[in-house]
Image (cartoon, rainbow, N blue to C red):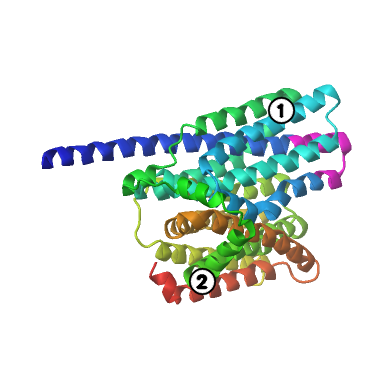
Protein backbone atom coordinates (compact mmCIF):
# COMPACT_ATOMS: atom_id res chain seq x y z
CA UNK A 1 0.00 0.00 0.00
CA UNK A 2 2.80 2.40 0.98
CA UNK A 3 4.67 1.62 -2.23
CA UNK A 4 1.53 2.30 -4.25
CA UNK A 5 1.09 5.69 -2.56
CA UNK A 6 4.74 6.61 -3.23
CA UNK A 7 4.38 5.52 -6.84
CA UNK A 8 1.25 7.65 -7.22
CA UNK A 9 3.05 10.65 -5.68
CA UNK A 10 5.98 10.23 -8.06
CA UNK A 11 3.65 9.91 -11.05
CA UNK A 12 1.75 13.02 -9.93
CA UNK A 13 4.99 15.02 -9.61
CA UNK A 14 6.07 13.92 -13.08
CA UNK A 15 2.66 14.85 -14.48
CA UNK A 16 2.81 18.29 -12.82
CA UNK A 17 6.31 18.94 -14.23
CA UNK A 18 5.09 18.05 -17.73
CA UNK A 19 2.12 20.40 -17.36
CA UNK A 20 4.43 23.18 -16.12
CA UNK A 21 6.71 22.73 -19.14
CA UNK A 22 3.71 22.86 -21.47
CA UNK A 23 2.39 25.97 -19.70
CA UNK A 24 5.75 27.76 -19.97
CA UNK A 25 5.93 27.02 -23.71
CA UNK A 26 2.33 28.09 -24.39
CA UNK A 27 2.59 31.24 -22.26
CA UNK A 28 5.88 32.22 -23.92
CA UNK A 29 4.46 31.67 -27.40
CA UNK A 30 1.29 33.58 -26.53
CA UNK A 31 3.24 36.55 -25.14
CA UNK A 32 5.62 36.43 -28.11
CA UNK A 33 2.75 36.75 -30.58
CA UNK A 34 0.83 39.32 -28.52
CA UNK A 35 3.79 41.57 -27.69
CA UNK A 36 5.34 41.42 -31.15
CA UNK A 37 1.93 41.98 -32.72
CA UNK A 38 1.26 45.03 -30.54
CA UNK A 39 4.74 46.56 -31.00
CA UNK A 40 4.80 45.97 -34.77
CA UNK A 41 1.25 47.34 -35.10
CA UNK A 42 2.12 50.47 -33.09
CA UNK A 43 5.26 51.21 -35.10
CA UNK A 44 3.80 50.43 -38.54
CA UNK A 45 0.63 52.45 -37.87
CA UNK A 46 2.70 55.35 -36.51
CA UNK A 47 4.78 55.42 -39.71
CA UNK A 48 1.60 55.27 -41.76
CA UNK A 49 0.10 58.24 -39.88
CA UNK A 50 3.29 60.30 -40.24
CA UNK A 51 3.52 59.55 -43.96
CA UNK A 52 -0.14 60.39 -44.59
CA UNK A 53 -0.47 63.49 -42.40
CA UNK A 54 3.11 64.63 -41.72
CA UNK A 55 1.78 65.81 -38.36
CA UNK A 56 3.61 65.25 -35.09
CA UNK A 57 0.36 66.03 -33.24
CA UNK A 58 -1.47 63.16 -34.95
CA UNK A 59 1.46 60.88 -34.17
CA UNK A 60 1.53 61.87 -30.48
CA UNK A 61 -2.26 61.41 -30.26
CA UNK A 62 -1.81 57.80 -31.36
CA UNK A 63 0.77 57.27 -28.61
CA UNK A 64 -1.54 58.88 -26.04
CA UNK A 65 -4.47 56.67 -27.06
CA UNK A 66 -2.17 53.66 -26.71
CA UNK A 67 -1.26 54.48 -23.08
CA UNK A 68 -4.53 56.02 -21.82
CA UNK A 69 -6.44 52.73 -21.25
CA UNK A 70 -3.71 51.51 -18.90
CA UNK A 71 -4.32 54.52 -16.64
CA UNK A 72 -8.11 54.44 -16.96
CA UNK A 73 -8.79 50.73 -16.67
CA UNK A 74 -5.89 49.29 -14.63
CA UNK A 75 -7.74 49.01 -11.27
CA UNK A 76 -10.96 47.93 -13.01
CA UNK A 77 -9.12 45.15 -14.85
CA UNK A 78 -7.70 44.01 -11.50
CA UNK A 79 -11.14 43.72 -9.89
CA UNK A 80 -12.51 41.82 -12.88
CA UNK A 81 -9.47 39.51 -12.89
CA UNK A 82 -10.18 38.64 -9.24
CA UNK A 83 -13.89 38.07 -9.80
CA UNK A 84 -14.03 36.05 -13.01
CA UNK A 85 -12.33 33.09 -14.67
CA UNK A 86 -8.87 34.37 -15.62
CA UNK A 87 -8.28 31.71 -18.25
CA UNK A 88 -11.44 32.71 -20.11
CA UNK A 89 -10.41 36.37 -19.88
CA UNK A 90 -6.93 35.70 -21.30
CA UNK A 91 -8.25 33.63 -24.21
CA UNK A 92 -11.19 35.98 -24.92
CA UNK A 93 -9.11 39.17 -24.84
CA UNK A 94 -6.43 37.82 -27.20
CA UNK A 95 -9.11 36.69 -29.65
CA UNK A 96 -10.89 40.03 -29.22
CA UNK A 97 -7.62 41.85 -30.02
CA UNK A 98 -7.52 39.95 -33.30
CA UNK A 99 -11.14 40.84 -34.02
CA UNK A 100 -10.38 44.54 -33.36
CA UNK A 101 -7.45 44.52 -35.82
CA UNK A 102 -9.50 42.63 -38.41
CA UNK A 103 -12.26 45.18 -37.83
CA UNK A 104 -9.86 47.93 -38.87
CA UNK A 105 -9.02 45.91 -41.97
CA UNK A 106 -12.72 45.52 -42.80
CA UNK A 107 -13.34 49.24 -42.29
CA UNK A 108 -10.39 50.11 -44.57
CA UNK A 109 -11.73 47.83 -47.32
CA UNK A 110 -15.29 49.14 -47.10
CA UNK A 111 -14.32 52.80 -46.75
CA UNK A 112 -10.67 53.80 -46.33
CA UNK A 113 -7.95 53.64 -43.67
CA UNK A 114 -8.90 56.94 -42.07
CA UNK A 115 -7.37 58.43 -38.94
CA UNK A 116 -10.60 58.09 -36.97
CA UNK A 117 -10.62 54.32 -37.59
CA UNK A 118 -6.97 54.06 -36.55
CA UNK A 119 -7.54 56.07 -33.36
CA UNK A 120 -10.53 53.93 -32.35
CA UNK A 121 -8.64 50.70 -33.10
CA UNK A 122 -5.55 51.84 -31.19
CA UNK A 123 -7.65 52.69 -28.12
CA UNK A 124 -9.61 49.41 -28.27
CA UNK A 125 -6.48 47.30 -28.85
CA UNK A 126 -4.71 48.94 -25.92
CA UNK A 127 -7.81 48.38 -23.77
CA UNK A 128 -7.79 44.68 -24.71
CA UNK A 129 -4.11 44.52 -23.75
CA UNK A 130 -4.86 45.94 -20.29
CA UNK A 131 -7.62 43.39 -19.62
CA UNK A 132 -5.39 40.64 -21.06
CA UNK A 133 -2.18 41.45 -19.17
CA UNK A 134 -3.73 41.87 -15.69
CA UNK A 135 -5.36 38.41 -15.39
CA UNK A 136 -2.33 36.76 -17.01
CA UNK A 137 0.08 38.47 -14.57
CA UNK A 138 -2.18 37.56 -11.63
CA UNK A 139 -2.32 33.93 -12.79
CA UNK A 140 1.42 33.33 -13.21
CA UNK A 141 1.90 31.74 -9.74
CA UNK A 142 -0.97 29.35 -10.50
CA UNK A 143 0.54 28.18 -13.80
CA UNK A 144 3.95 26.93 -12.59
CA UNK A 145 5.64 25.46 -9.54
CA UNK A 146 7.95 27.44 -7.24
CA UNK A 147 11.05 26.21 -9.07
CA UNK A 148 9.94 27.90 -12.29
CA UNK A 149 8.41 31.12 -10.95
CA UNK A 150 11.56 33.20 -11.50
CA UNK A 151 12.19 31.45 -14.82
CA UNK A 152 8.77 32.27 -16.28
CA UNK A 153 9.08 35.93 -15.18
CA UNK A 154 12.55 36.08 -16.73
CA UNK A 155 11.26 34.60 -19.99
CA UNK A 156 8.49 37.19 -19.99
CA UNK A 157 11.07 39.99 -19.72
CA UNK A 158 13.17 38.30 -22.41
CA UNK A 159 10.23 38.32 -24.80
CA UNK A 160 9.41 41.92 -23.90
CA UNK A 161 13.02 42.98 -24.56
CA UNK A 162 13.07 41.12 -27.87
CA UNK A 163 9.84 42.85 -28.87
CA UNK A 164 11.32 46.24 -27.90
CA UNK A 165 14.43 45.61 -30.00
CA UNK A 166 12.93 43.84 -33.01
CA UNK A 167 9.41 45.30 -33.02
CA UNK A 168 10.32 48.70 -34.53
CA UNK A 169 12.72 47.06 -37.01
CA UNK A 170 10.08 44.56 -38.19
CA UNK A 171 7.45 47.29 -38.16
CA UNK A 172 9.64 49.40 -40.44
CA UNK A 173 10.12 46.47 -42.83
CA UNK A 174 6.40 45.73 -42.77
CA UNK A 175 5.57 49.32 -43.63
CA UNK A 176 8.19 49.49 -46.40
CA UNK A 177 7.63 46.09 -48.04
CA UNK A 178 4.07 44.96 -47.28
CA UNK A 179 0.73 46.60 -47.96
CA UNK A 180 -0.65 47.87 -44.65
CA UNK A 181 -3.91 45.94 -45.19
CA UNK A 182 -2.09 42.64 -45.65
CA UNK A 183 -0.21 43.33 -42.43
CA UNK A 184 -3.49 43.98 -40.60
CA UNK A 185 -4.80 40.61 -41.83
CA UNK A 186 -1.73 38.71 -40.60
CA UNK A 187 -1.62 40.67 -37.34
CA UNK A 188 -5.30 40.05 -36.58
CA UNK A 189 -5.08 36.32 -37.33
CA UNK A 190 -1.94 35.98 -35.17
CA UNK A 191 -3.81 37.36 -32.15
CA UNK A 192 -6.64 34.86 -32.70
CA UNK A 193 -4.21 31.93 -33.09
CA UNK A 194 -2.46 33.04 -29.90
CA UNK A 195 -5.78 33.08 -28.05
CA UNK A 196 -6.61 29.57 -29.26
CA UNK A 197 -3.21 28.26 -28.09
CA UNK A 198 -3.77 29.82 -24.64
CA UNK A 199 -6.95 27.76 -24.27
CA UNK A 200 -4.65 24.74 -23.71
CA UNK A 201 -2.85 26.34 -20.74
CA UNK A 202 -3.62 24.67 -17.39
CA UNK A 203 -4.51 27.43 -14.93
CA UNK A 204 -4.84 25.02 -11.98
CA UNK A 205 -1.31 23.71 -11.52
CA UNK A 206 -1.04 25.29 -8.06
CA UNK A 207 -4.18 23.46 -6.95
CA UNK A 208 -2.69 20.14 -8.06
CA UNK A 209 0.56 20.86 -6.22
CA UNK A 210 -1.29 21.83 -3.03
CA UNK A 211 -3.81 19.01 -3.41
CA UNK A 212 -6.75 21.42 -3.27
CA UNK A 213 -10.09 20.35 -4.62
CA UNK A 214 -11.48 23.85 -4.81
CA UNK A 215 -9.89 26.10 -7.38
CA UNK A 216 -9.31 29.81 -7.21
CA UNK A 217 -11.53 30.20 -10.26
CA UNK A 218 -14.40 28.63 -8.31
CA UNK A 219 -13.94 31.21 -5.59
CA UNK A 220 -13.78 33.94 -8.20
CA UNK A 221 -17.03 32.77 -9.79
CA UNK A 222 -18.76 32.65 -6.39
CA UNK A 223 -17.52 36.15 -5.70
CA UNK A 224 -18.75 37.37 -9.06
CA UNK A 225 -22.29 36.54 -8.02
CA UNK A 226 -22.14 39.28 -5.43
CA UNK A 227 -22.64 42.73 -6.90
CA UNK A 228 -19.79 44.38 -4.96
CA UNK A 229 -17.57 45.84 -7.64
CA UNK A 230 -16.70 49.11 -5.87
CA UNK A 231 -16.33 47.30 -2.54
CA UNK A 232 -13.90 44.84 -4.11
CA UNK A 233 -11.87 47.72 -5.52
CA UNK A 234 -11.66 49.36 -2.10
CA UNK A 235 -10.78 46.02 -0.49
CA UNK A 236 -7.74 45.84 -2.75
CA UNK A 237 -6.63 49.34 -1.73
CA UNK A 238 -7.19 48.53 1.94
CA UNK A 239 -5.15 45.36 1.61
CA UNK A 240 -2.22 47.34 0.16
CA UNK A 241 -2.52 49.89 2.99
CA UNK A 242 -2.46 47.24 5.74
CA UNK A 243 0.66 45.43 4.47
CA UNK A 244 3.75 47.51 5.29
CA UNK A 245 6.06 45.36 3.14
CA UNK A 246 3.68 45.81 0.21
CA UNK A 247 3.35 49.55 0.79
CA UNK A 248 7.15 49.93 0.72
CA UNK A 249 7.74 47.57 -2.20
CA UNK A 250 4.70 48.88 -4.11
CA UNK A 251 5.75 52.50 -3.63
CA UNK A 252 9.18 51.60 -4.96
CA UNK A 253 7.63 49.94 -8.02
CA UNK A 254 5.48 53.01 -8.68
CA UNK A 255 8.28 55.57 -8.31
CA UNK A 256 11.01 53.53 -10.02
CA UNK A 257 9.66 54.16 -13.54
CA UNK A 258 9.08 57.84 -12.79
CA UNK A 259 12.68 58.29 -11.61
CA UNK A 260 13.99 56.52 -14.74
CA UNK A 261 11.89 58.91 -16.84
CA UNK A 262 13.19 61.94 -14.91
CA UNK A 263 16.80 60.79 -14.66
CA UNK A 264 17.39 59.05 -18.00
CA UNK A 265 14.63 59.06 -20.61
CA UNK A 266 14.28 62.86 -20.85
CA UNK A 267 17.58 64.55 -19.82
CA UNK A 268 20.10 62.15 -21.42
CA UNK A 269 18.66 62.36 -24.97
CA UNK A 270 18.54 66.14 -24.56
CA UNK A 271 22.19 66.27 -23.43
CA UNK A 272 23.61 63.91 -26.05
CA UNK A 273 21.69 65.53 -28.91
CA UNK A 274 21.43 69.21 -28.01
CA UNK A 275 24.60 69.68 -25.90
CA UNK A 276 27.07 67.10 -27.23
CA UNK A 277 25.67 66.81 -30.74
CA UNK A 278 25.61 63.03 -31.08
CA UNK A 279 25.04 61.72 -34.60
CA UNK A 280 21.85 59.76 -35.28
CA UNK A 281 23.92 56.56 -35.43
CA UNK A 282 25.51 57.23 -32.03
CA UNK A 283 22.14 58.05 -30.50
CA UNK A 284 20.66 54.90 -32.03
CA UNK A 285 23.44 52.74 -30.57
CA UNK A 286 22.87 54.26 -27.12
CA UNK A 287 19.12 53.63 -27.31
CA UNK A 288 19.72 49.98 -28.15
CA UNK A 289 21.79 49.35 -25.02
CA UNK A 290 18.92 49.23 -22.53
CA UNK A 291 16.79 46.59 -24.30
CA UNK A 292 19.93 44.59 -25.18
CA UNK A 293 21.08 44.65 -21.55
CA UNK A 294 17.60 43.65 -20.38
CA UNK A 295 17.55 40.79 -22.88
CA UNK A 296 20.93 39.50 -21.72
CA UNK A 297 19.98 39.74 -18.04
CA UNK A 298 16.61 38.05 -18.60
CA UNK A 299 18.28 35.08 -20.31
CA UNK A 300 20.85 34.77 -17.50
CA UNK A 301 18.18 35.04 -14.80
CA UNK A 302 16.06 32.35 -16.46
CA UNK A 303 19.03 29.95 -16.20
CA UNK A 304 20.10 30.77 -12.64
CA UNK A 305 18.63 28.67 -9.83
CA UNK A 306 15.89 30.04 -7.59
CA UNK A 307 17.11 32.12 -4.61
CA UNK A 308 15.48 32.25 -1.19
CA UNK A 309 16.22 35.90 -0.38
CA UNK A 310 14.80 38.02 -3.22
CA UNK A 311 14.91 41.20 -1.12
CA UNK A 312 18.70 40.96 -0.75
CA UNK A 313 19.09 40.67 -4.53
CA UNK A 314 16.69 43.60 -5.05
CA UNK A 315 18.64 45.86 -2.67
CA UNK A 316 22.04 44.96 -4.20
CA UNK A 317 20.80 45.66 -7.73
CA UNK A 318 18.98 48.82 -6.65
CA UNK A 319 22.27 50.07 -5.18
CA UNK A 320 24.02 49.31 -8.49
CA UNK A 321 21.34 51.11 -10.50
CA UNK A 322 21.36 54.11 -8.14
CA UNK A 323 25.13 54.55 -8.34
CA UNK A 324 25.11 54.10 -12.13
CA UNK A 325 22.46 56.78 -12.72
CA UNK A 326 24.34 59.12 -10.35
CA UNK A 327 27.52 58.55 -12.41
CA UNK A 328 25.53 59.39 -15.57
CA UNK A 329 24.77 62.77 -13.99
CA UNK A 330 28.39 63.21 -12.95
CA UNK A 331 29.62 62.31 -16.45
CA UNK A 332 27.19 64.59 -18.28
CA UNK A 333 27.95 67.51 -15.95
CA UNK A 334 31.50 67.74 -17.41
CA UNK A 335 32.66 69.05 -14.03
CA UNK A 336 35.58 66.66 -13.55
CA UNK A 337 36.25 65.42 -17.06
CA UNK A 338 35.59 66.46 -20.67
CA UNK A 339 35.75 63.80 -23.40
CA UNK A 340 34.97 63.48 -27.08
CA UNK A 341 31.66 62.00 -28.28
CA UNK A 342 33.07 58.54 -28.96
CA UNK A 343 34.45 58.32 -25.41
CA UNK A 344 31.17 59.58 -23.97
CA UNK A 345 29.28 56.98 -26.01
CA UNK A 346 31.50 54.12 -24.77
CA UNK A 347 31.09 55.09 -21.10
CA UNK A 348 27.34 55.70 -21.42
CA UNK A 349 26.97 52.36 -23.21
CA UNK A 350 28.63 50.56 -20.29
CA UNK A 351 26.48 52.45 -17.75
CA UNK A 352 23.28 51.74 -19.72
CA UNK A 353 24.11 48.03 -19.87
CA UNK A 354 24.79 48.02 -16.11
CA UNK A 355 21.46 49.72 -15.38
CA UNK A 356 19.55 47.44 -17.75
CA UNK A 357 20.97 44.30 -16.10
CA UNK A 358 20.27 45.76 -12.64
CA UNK A 359 16.72 46.69 -13.69
CA UNK A 360 15.91 43.10 -14.67
CA UNK A 361 17.47 41.76 -11.47
CA UNK A 362 15.19 44.20 -9.63
CA UNK A 363 11.96 43.78 -11.63
CA UNK A 364 11.87 39.98 -11.79
CA UNK A 365 12.49 39.37 -8.04
CA UNK A 366 9.94 42.10 -7.21
CA UNK A 367 7.37 40.40 -9.45
CA UNK A 368 8.15 36.98 -7.95
CA UNK A 369 7.85 38.36 -4.40
CA UNK A 370 4.50 40.01 -5.15
CA UNK A 371 3.21 36.87 -6.86
CA UNK A 372 4.21 34.63 -3.96
CA UNK A 373 2.97 36.74 -1.07
CA UNK A 374 -0.21 38.40 -2.37
CA UNK A 375 -3.25 36.11 -1.93
CA UNK A 376 -4.68 34.80 -5.18
CA UNK A 377 -8.04 36.52 -4.66
CA UNK A 378 -6.29 39.91 -4.20
CA UNK A 379 -3.51 39.59 -6.79
CA UNK A 380 -5.44 41.05 -9.73
CA UNK A 381 -6.52 44.17 -7.86
CA UNK A 382 -3.08 44.81 -6.38
CA UNK A 383 -1.35 44.25 -9.75
CA UNK A 384 -3.85 46.48 -11.59
CA UNK A 385 -3.60 49.28 -9.01
CA UNK A 386 0.21 49.31 -8.90
CA UNK A 387 0.38 49.18 -12.70
CA UNK A 388 -2.01 52.11 -13.03
CA UNK A 389 -0.11 54.24 -10.52
CA UNK A 390 3.16 53.46 -12.31
CA UNK A 391 1.69 54.38 -15.69
CA UNK A 392 0.17 57.57 -14.29
CA UNK A 393 3.40 58.78 -12.66
CA UNK A 394 5.69 58.03 -15.63
CA UNK A 395 4.20 60.78 -17.85
CA UNK A 396 4.23 63.10 -14.84
CA UNK A 397 7.95 62.39 -14.49
CA UNK A 398 8.42 63.10 -18.20
CA UNK A 399 6.52 66.41 -17.98
CA UNK A 400 8.42 67.55 -14.87
CA UNK A 401 11.76 66.59 -16.43
CA UNK A 402 10.82 68.29 -19.71
CA UNK A 403 10.01 71.51 -17.86
CA UNK A 404 13.17 71.39 -15.72
CA UNK A 405 15.57 70.51 -18.53
CA UNK A 406 14.97 73.94 -20.08
CA UNK A 407 15.39 75.87 -16.82
CA UNK A 408 18.20 74.09 -14.94
CA UNK A 409 21.38 72.26 -15.88
CA UNK A 410 20.06 68.97 -17.33
CA UNK A 411 22.81 66.86 -15.69
CA UNK A 412 21.23 67.65 -12.31
CA UNK A 413 18.26 65.40 -13.14
CA UNK A 414 20.13 62.05 -13.35
CA UNK A 415 22.30 63.07 -10.40
CA UNK A 416 19.31 63.95 -8.18
CA UNK A 417 17.41 60.84 -9.34
CA UNK A 418 20.43 58.73 -8.37
CA UNK A 419 20.59 60.34 -4.92
CA UNK A 420 16.86 59.72 -4.38
CA UNK A 421 17.30 56.07 -5.37
CA UNK A 422 20.23 55.72 -2.97
CA UNK A 423 18.03 57.11 -0.18
CA UNK A 424 15.23 54.69 -1.13
CA UNK A 425 17.69 51.79 -1.01
CA UNK A 426 18.93 52.79 2.45
CA UNK A 427 15.34 53.13 3.70
CA UNK A 428 14.26 49.78 2.24
CA UNK A 429 17.26 48.02 3.77
CA UNK A 430 16.10 49.13 7.23
CA UNK A 431 12.43 48.13 6.92
CA UNK A 432 11.98 45.13 9.20
CA UNK A 433 8.86 43.87 7.39
CA UNK A 434 10.82 43.62 4.12
CA UNK A 435 13.65 41.67 5.73
CA UNK A 436 11.20 39.09 7.03
CA UNK A 437 9.44 38.21 3.76
Quadrant in which the C terminus is drawn? bottom left
Q: Secondary structure at mark 2?
A: helix
Q: Residue at x 84, y 36 (%)?
A: 115
Q: Quadrant of residue 326?
A: bottom right
Question: In this image, 189 relative to 31: left or right?
Answer: right
Residue 351 in sight here: no
Specify the principal SS of the magenta part. helix
Give whichever of discs 1 and 2 has the lower sequence position. 1
Question: Which numbered disc covers residue 102?
Answer: 1
Q: Tell me: residue 236, above or below residue 24.
A: below
Residue bounds of the magenta highlight? 45-59
Q: Nearer the viewer, residue 136 or 222?
A: 222
Residue carrying label 2? 242
Q: Position of residue 275 (x, y in %)?
A: 76, 60
Image position, residue 361 (x, y; %): 47, 56
Q: Residues within 10 Å of mark 2 (few under 14, many from 20)?
A: few
Q: Is residue 207 above or below residue 197?
A: below
Amino acid sequence: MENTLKKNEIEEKIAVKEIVKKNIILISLGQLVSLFGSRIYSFAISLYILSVTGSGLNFSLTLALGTLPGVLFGPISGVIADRFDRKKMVVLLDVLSGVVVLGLLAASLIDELSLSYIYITTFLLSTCNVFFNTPLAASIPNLVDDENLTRINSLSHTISSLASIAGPFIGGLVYALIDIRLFLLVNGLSFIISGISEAFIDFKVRDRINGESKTSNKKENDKAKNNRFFTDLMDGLRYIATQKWLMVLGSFVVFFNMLIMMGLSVPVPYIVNEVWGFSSQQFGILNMMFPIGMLMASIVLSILPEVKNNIKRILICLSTFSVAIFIVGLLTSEIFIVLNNTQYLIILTILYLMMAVAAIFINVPVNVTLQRLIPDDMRGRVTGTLGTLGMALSPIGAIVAGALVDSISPWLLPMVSGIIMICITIYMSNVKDLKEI
